[in-house]
Image (cartoon, rainbow, N blue to C red):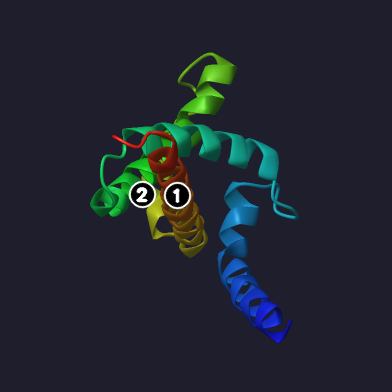
């Protein structure tokens, strides 16, 4: 049981490190909205895991997953709002110097790395020849 507590402590420290970014960009500042984040993550990770041919490309697919996730984060409000009035490239590019946004991107990278790896293993078990 003490091993479970030790692993839980490590995972909780990692979550505490990424929490400010998740609260700011995947939540309302007080709590993380997990459902939209995980639905978007699940769809993107599933498609990327199906496209994954070998485990050596996992880092490339992780990067691609994070980029697609950020693009969907930026484009989805414009699709819902029906126009380009809400997009400011200067503000968008300025986020990449903000430490909380970089923590959000780091949390996404960890999520996509683990998610694509697990889904890729499941895919390789189901589709033996692929």
- Residue 71, image x, y percentages: 41, 34
Question: Outermost residue toward the bottom?
Answer: 2
Q: Answer whether residue 123 is visible to the viewer in this image.
A: yes
Sequence-earlier tag: 1 or 2: 2
Bin the neighbour count of mark 1 within 10 Å (Cα to Cα): few under 14, some 14-19, many 20 and up.
many
Q: Which of 92 and 118 is in front in this view?
A: 118
Secondary structure under tag 1 reads: helix
Q: What crowding class fits label 2: few (fewer than 14 Cα within 10 Å), some (14-19), or many (20 or more)?
A: many
Q: Do the residues labelled 1 and 2 touch (CB within 8 Å)?
A: yes
Badge number at residue 112: 1
Query: Which quadrant of the figure contains the C terminus?
Result: top left
Displayed quadrant of residue 53? top left
Q: Residue 92 carries which label?
A: none
Q: Mark 2 points at which residue?
A: 62
Is 91 on the left or on the right of 31, as rendered?
left
The answer to whether 75 is drawn above or below residue 112 in the figure is above
Q: In which quarter of the image is residue 64?
A: top left
Q: Is residue 93 above or below residue 48?
A: below
Residue at the spot 61% in from the left edge and 71% down from the top edge: 11
> How far apart are labels 1 and 2 at the CA level?
5 Å
**Residue 86 rendering spot, x and y as whole percentages:** 51, 27
When the figure is inspected, residue 43 is found, relative to residue 82, above or below; the finding is: below
Q: In x, y percent, where is residue 44?
A: 46, 34
- The residue drawn where x is 58% and y is 18% is 81
């Amino acid at each position: 049981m003490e091993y479970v507590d030790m692993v839980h402590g490590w995972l909780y420290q990692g979550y505490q490190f990424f929490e400010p970014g998740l609260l700011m960009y995947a939540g309302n500042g007080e709590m993380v909205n997990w459902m939209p984040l995980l639905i978007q993550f699940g769809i993107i990770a599933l498609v990327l895991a199906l496209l994954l041919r070998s485990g050596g490309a996992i880092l490339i697919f992780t990067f691609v997953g994070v980029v697609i996730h950020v693009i969907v984060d930026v484009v989805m409000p414009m699709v819902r709002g029906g126009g380009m009035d809400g997009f400011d490239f200067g503000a968008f590019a300025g986020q990449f110097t903000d430490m909380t946004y970089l923590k959000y991107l780091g949390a996404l990278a960890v999520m996509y790395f683990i998610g694509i790896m697990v889904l890729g293993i499941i895919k390789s078990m189901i589709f033996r020849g692929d």
